[in-house]
Amino acid sequence: MPTAVDDDLFDRAGELKQQLVAFSQQRRYDRAFDDVLEDQHDGRVPLDEHTLMILWDYFVLEHRLPDGRTVVEQFVAAHPELSEQEQRMLLGWRDVVQGPFEVQRRDGATLVVVNLVDDLTYRVRSNMGPSVFRRTPRRSFLLARLVAVGEEWMISGPMSVWRAQERDVAYEMALEMSLRVPEAVYRNPEKLAQAWELQRQDRDRFVRFFGSDLVVVTGDQVADRMTGFYAFCRAEVSGTSSSTVAADDAVFELPPDVVDAETVAMIYDEVDGLGFYAEFGLVEAAFADPDLLRRRRYREHTLAYLQDDSVGPLVLRRLAARDPERASVVFRRLLKKPRFDWTRDGEVLLRAYKPEYSRRAPRPRVSPVSERLAAYAGRR
């Protein structure tokens, strides 16, 4: 059981949060916050004070400004008098934990809650005092943003409370978040390990169904082939015949560039998971015969695989691995670098063109949910 946070540290955290909010209200941040409003809020819906406060908290702690830093990072840089512990705590607030949470019990000034997304327990306080928890009885649900203060957590921004009878509202939000933001699930190391195992099993089914982890089809075939694959998966998991699974049980939607492509590669990698690569046939042919790069279509699509942020480095690594010498010729001609050598320069090139993929830790593409959310999804 984590040790309780020193009251002085928590009081100091509350003071620093107030100073941070005041710092963030400088006029120089107005335009950046307007951009957040435009991106995060549907202008057709009236903006109430509660939503505005949540968006402001997100802006201060998580939004990257044009210089690449967050407001809280700029606040720390502007206050060198802060202790090392205070700096670490403030910078740790960039990693926000979001609800919904189920209330377990009160423990003095602390509220003990379980996050419905990651299944972890959090000891929560409010810098407004424990009186705010009077309306959060056991088995009620709390929607809030939490930041770490030592081994405990502080509510950051406004909170909403749902009664125990409104459980389905909390479960629906948690289920949606689990699927939309799997990183929130992976806070729990057990969930992360489970996700890797689920992805391994899913890839194994893909290989058994298609005969390989790389399949090339026409764009208008992808949806039907994937619908068949998911029917196969559901039948295998449930132990029923695939013929008993209705074709409309799942609707597989794809972006127009994939549907309209002459060829699409479906690649299920052990680490990167399942990906769809439009016009793979053209790029594959260029790697097999670099002379094709003299033709516009081949050159444009091969260059797009390198320059497009949505295309991960996996597919280029796979194509280059078939013949590193030919891959060297491909990139020499694409980049006009006569001395380029894939074996020596390939990874440096991919890090330069795909920086986000090199910065983040590998994560599975599947998102396990808790037993309670799985049971809710089954009932729904």
Image (cartoon, rainbow, N blue to C red):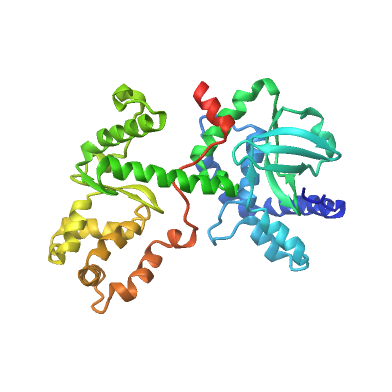
Tag count: 0
Q: Residue at x 32, y 22 (%)?
A: 244
> Does residue 152 appear left or right of residue 175 in this picture?
right
> Does residue 74 appear left or right of residue 8 in this picture?
left
The residue nearer to you, when weighing 370 against 260, is: 370
Q: Is residue 46 visible?
A: no
Please tell me in which quadrant of the rendered image residue 252 appears: top left
The residue nearer to you, when weighing 183 against 322, is: 322
Q: Is residue 199 visible?
A: yes
Residue 111 higher or lower than 28, as above or below: above
> Does residue 298 appear left or right of residue 320 in this picture?
left
Please tell me in which quadrant of the rendered image residue 237 appears: top left
Image x and y of residue 246, in percent: 32, 22
The residue nearer to you, when weighing 82 against 201, is: 201
Image x and y of residue 155, in percent: 73, 43
Q: Residue at x 38, y 31 (%)?
A: 234
Residue lying at the far front in this picture: please name it.
Answer: 239
Image x and y of residue 36, in percent: 55, 45
Q: Residue at x 36, y 34 (%)?
A: 233
Image x and y of residue 70, in percent: 60, 57
Residue 140 higher or lower than 366, as above or below: above
Residue 367 higher or lower than 299, as above or below: above
